[in-house]
């Protein structure tokens, strides 16, 4: 195994000492970068980009060519799994992702099957292998998946939703059906993440983007229990290296102790919680990733620097912090504002690691 030139991100996730706080940005490849929009135009559409290992590699590397980021994230989407289950993913302009065949009938739900990640999702594994080659051991590659509940939201609603009323009505009226979807999803996510690890992913992140729409009891029963199921089946070491895991529940600040108990290495935080308070609550159980409000990047570079300083100060001295935004970077962000954030993290974090 060739050592990484920069393994700061992996060390921070394992709460080992680093010289500075590593940083990457959720959704770092995307429409705020003009070069991404050019690549996407060449692909024809978004799924064309995901299914071409050459173009997925290009998109993955674009943010790294601009900013000295400490990690790369696979260019793909969380909705590849339900697409591979036959729901028919498409993107309608201006409306986000949609499914041609959303899950509404018991018959369709009971027919769901776990896709073979190396066959139906073989294009993702090909992209992982090609990206690892292109990265040439500069920085680690993050693999990812949606959480079983977040995937179920899109699968039942058929797309995004302001209130998730269809999936939540199923939760209350037909919990048996939702549990069936979630169990299939948890098995699919476990197999998918493990295949990404075998193809070369060096850390994995699970996006539970809509877990925060649930009540505390429902979160435990319908989201966290299935995150636990994934953690129980995840590969923890590959090729002699630890494979750290990050669980991000947007709106999960109320439930940090419960999330820390499922066996993940790190918790991703949104911007609503103070990271220092979060650190005191989880103690030395997990590392923390986050949590600058993405809207800070709309403000002046001096303001961005000051806000970065506040997050670093709140976390305080010591190990176990990966700097990130509290949610994905907005498509309306100016790239030089992202550059100001990355530079500020690297410069201002050194004293906390002395
Ligand atoms: O972080 C990265 O750079 C890697 C790529 C990545 C994408 N989506 C690319 C993408 C990752 C990690 C995701 C995760 C994802 N996808 C999540 C979880 C993170 C979160 O934001 O909460 C969710 C909920 C999705 C579902 C999804 N895919 C939505 C809601 C949309 C449309 C809205 C939007 O932000 O554009 C997508 C499409 C998508 N996925 C785009 C990109 C770059 C934009 C597609 C385009 O080029 O038009």
Image: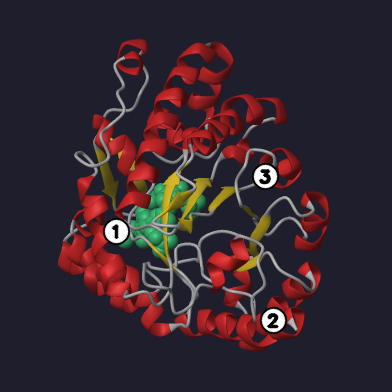
Say which label, 3 or 1, has the lower sequence index: 1
Question: Ligand 1 within 8 A of label 1's CB?
Answer: no
Residue 123 in the image, given as x and y percentages of width and height: 21, 50
Say which label, 3 or 2, has the lower sequence index: 3
Say which label, 2 or 1, has the lower sequence index: 1
Q: Quadrant of residue 133?
A: bottom left
User: Can you tell which of label 3 and label 2 is closer to the viewer?
Assistant: 2
Q: Residue at x 39, y 45 (%)?
A: 193
The residue wearing badge 3 is 252
| Of residues 31 and 117, the one drawn nearer to the viewer in this rendering | 117
Query: Which quadrant of the figure shows ligand 1?
Result: bottom left
Q: Residue at x 58, y 75 (%)?
A: 297
Q: Is residue 292 left or right of residue 87?
A: right
Q: Is residue 203 left or right of residue 302?
A: left
Question: Is 349 drawn above or below residue 164 in the view shown?
Answer: below
Q: Quadrant of residue 44?
A: bottom left
| Of residues 222 and 322, the one drawn nearer to the viewer in this rendering | 322
- Marks 3/1: CA distance? 29 Å
Count residues near mark 2 (Cα–Cα under 10 Å), then give few for <14, some for 14-19, many for 20+: many
Q: Which mark is residue 128?
A: 1
Q: How is the image coloured?
A: secondary structure
Residue 338 in the image, given as x and y percentages of width and height: 52, 79
Count residues near mark 3 (Cα–Cα under 10 Å), then give few for <14, some for 14-19, many for 20+: many
Q: Are marks 3 and 1 in contact (CB under 8 Å)?
A: no
User: Which secondary structure, mark 2?
Assistant: helix
Question: Ligand 1 within 8 A of label 3's CB?
Answer: no
Residue 144 in the image, given as x and y percentages of width and height: 42, 51
Q: Which mark is residue 349?
A: 2
Q: Which mark is residue 216?
A: none
Q: Residue at x 24, y 31 (%)?
A: 86
């Amino acid at each position: 195994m060739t050592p990484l030139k920069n393994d700061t991100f992996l060390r921070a996730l394992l709460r080992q000492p680093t010289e500075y706080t590593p940083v990457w940005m959720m959704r770092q490849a995307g429409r705020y970068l003009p070069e991404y929009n050019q690549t996407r135009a060449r692909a024809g559409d978004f799924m064309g980009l995901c299914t071409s290992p050459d173009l997925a590699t290009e998109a993955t590397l674009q943010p790294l060519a601009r900013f000295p980021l400490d990690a790369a994230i696979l260019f793909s989407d969380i909705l590849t799994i339900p697409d591979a289950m036959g729901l028919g993913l498409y993107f309608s302009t201006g409306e986000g992702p949609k499914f041609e065949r959303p899950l509404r009938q018991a018959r369709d739900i009971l027919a769901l099957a776990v896709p073979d990640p190396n066959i139906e999702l073989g294009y993702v594994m090909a992209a992982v292998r090609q990206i690892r080659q292109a990265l040439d051991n500069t920085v680690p590659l993050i693999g990812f998946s949606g959480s079983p509940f977040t995937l179920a939201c899109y699968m039942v609603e058929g797309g995004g939703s302001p209130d998730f009323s269809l999936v939540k009505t199923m939760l209350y009226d037909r919990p048996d059906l939702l549990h069936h979807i979630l169990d299939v999803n948890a098995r699919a996510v476990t197999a998918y993440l493990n295949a990404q690890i075998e193809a070369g992913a060096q850390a994995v992140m699970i996006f539970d983007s809509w877990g925060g729409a649930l009540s505390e009891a429902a979160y435990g029963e319908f989201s966290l229990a299935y995150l636990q199921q994934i953690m129980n089946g995840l590969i923890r070491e590959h090729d002699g290296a630890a494979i750290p895991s990050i669980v991000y529940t947007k709106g999960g600040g109320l439930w940090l102790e419960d999330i820390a108990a499922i066996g993940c290495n790190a918790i991703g935080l949104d911007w609503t919680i103070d990271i220092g308070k979060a650190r005191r609550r989880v103690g030395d159980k997990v590392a923390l990733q986050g949590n600058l409000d993405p809207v800070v990047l709309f403000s002046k570079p001096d303001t961005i620097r000051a806000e970065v300083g506040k997050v670093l100060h709140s976390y305080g001295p010591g190990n176990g912090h990966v700097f990130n935004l509290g949610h994905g970077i907005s498509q309306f962000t100016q790239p030089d504002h992202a550059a100001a954030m990355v530079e500020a993290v690297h410069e201002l974090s050194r004293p906390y690691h002395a």
